Image (cartoon, rainbow, N blue to C red):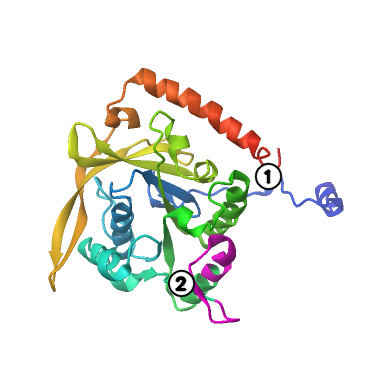
Amino acid sequence: MSDKTKLKNISKIDYRFFSDIEFKLIDWLWEGAFAKGKVSIVAGDPGLGKSQLTLSIAAIVSSGGIWPASENSMSKSDVIILAAEDYPEDTIGPRLQAAGADLSMCIYIDSVIESANSTIRSFNIKKDIHYLAKIIEQLRNHSIAISLVIIDSITAYLGDNSHDNSEVRRILSPLSDFAIKFQVAIVCISHLNKNENSAALLRISGSVAFVATARSAFLVLRDNKDKERLSFIPFKNNLARDQTGFSFKIEPIQLDGGIHTSRMDWDDETVSKTVSEVRGGNQNMTKKSAETGAIEYLQDILANGGIAGH
């Protein structure tokens, strides 16, 4: 028995030497944007197409389509959708079809049925993440592989805990573990609060723990120079140096049966603008907001007992 092994056997803490860890590449769902095994955030003001955007991504994943402004496609895989703000019959389903999704590879989570009393209730991340794990395991036993889970919106599935920084961290930690275990990309939608003078990090509705936990975060913004054009811009990315953004318009479309819906029309070119450039704001205000945001962020963490383990 080596000295290292002896050390580990007498410790109550599970640890590893980095020399024993096998490094691996990041497994991208959408390269530079969303990775498998990670949690990501898409945020923006109401009515800017955040849900539409994630359904467009679901369509690409389920159909093996081509990613925006590129020639890169992906292998078809299944998608799970948790959506609290739209109905699958008149909104989500038609939008998926209009986007070209393979509907047989898109799964909608309706509700949770309590076995004890047959009560039907909404899905709750804290209570029900193990149920979602069982679903994925069952699907994999039938050769159905999930690579993307969409949660729209994240605060709708946290119960009454979405503003408690410490509690949100405790809830989101198992969600991150879930993403790693099943190697799925989890994309969560969040709204922005009304404080436009704050840094983007602090405008995410609820707790700053959402952005702290997410490995990548994007804003959906309206271009001040073209009101019909919307931009999808990264403002945090711990996984890649790529700061490429994308732009799109939402166009109406009518499906068979007279069903009116809409779909994304992605631009062929990427966007190199920053969040402040898309907004049309001045750099001094942006710098001030970022500094104020950093101070407020630290104050919020300290007010909630600091960061776990520190």
Label drawn at residue 111: 2
Tell me if 152 is positioned left or right of 163 in this view: left
Instruction: Look at the picture and state if 269 lies above or below 98.
Output: above
Q: Secondary structure at mark 1?
A: helix
108 or 18, which lies in front?
A: 108
Q: Residue at x 55, y 56 (%)?
A: 175
Discs 2/1, front = 2
Task: Confirm whether the magenta stretch covers residue 125.
Answer: yes
Q: Position of residue 142 (x, y in %)?
A: 45, 79
Q: Residue at x 44, y 75 (%)?
A: 143
Q: Residue at x 24, y 49 (%)?
A: 71
Q: Which residues are magenta?
A: 114-132
227 or 106, which lies in front?
A: 227
Q: Are marks 2 and 1 in contact (CB under 8 Å)?
A: no
Q: Amino acid at mark 2?
A: Ser
Q: Which residue is mark 1?
A: 19
Is residue 41 visible in the rendered image? The answer is: yes
Q: Amino acid at mark 1?
A: Ser
Q: Position of residue 131 (x, y in %)?
A: 55, 71
Task: Confirm whether the magenta stretch covers residue 243.
Answer: no
Instruction: Look at the picture and state if 56 lies above or below 259.
Output: above
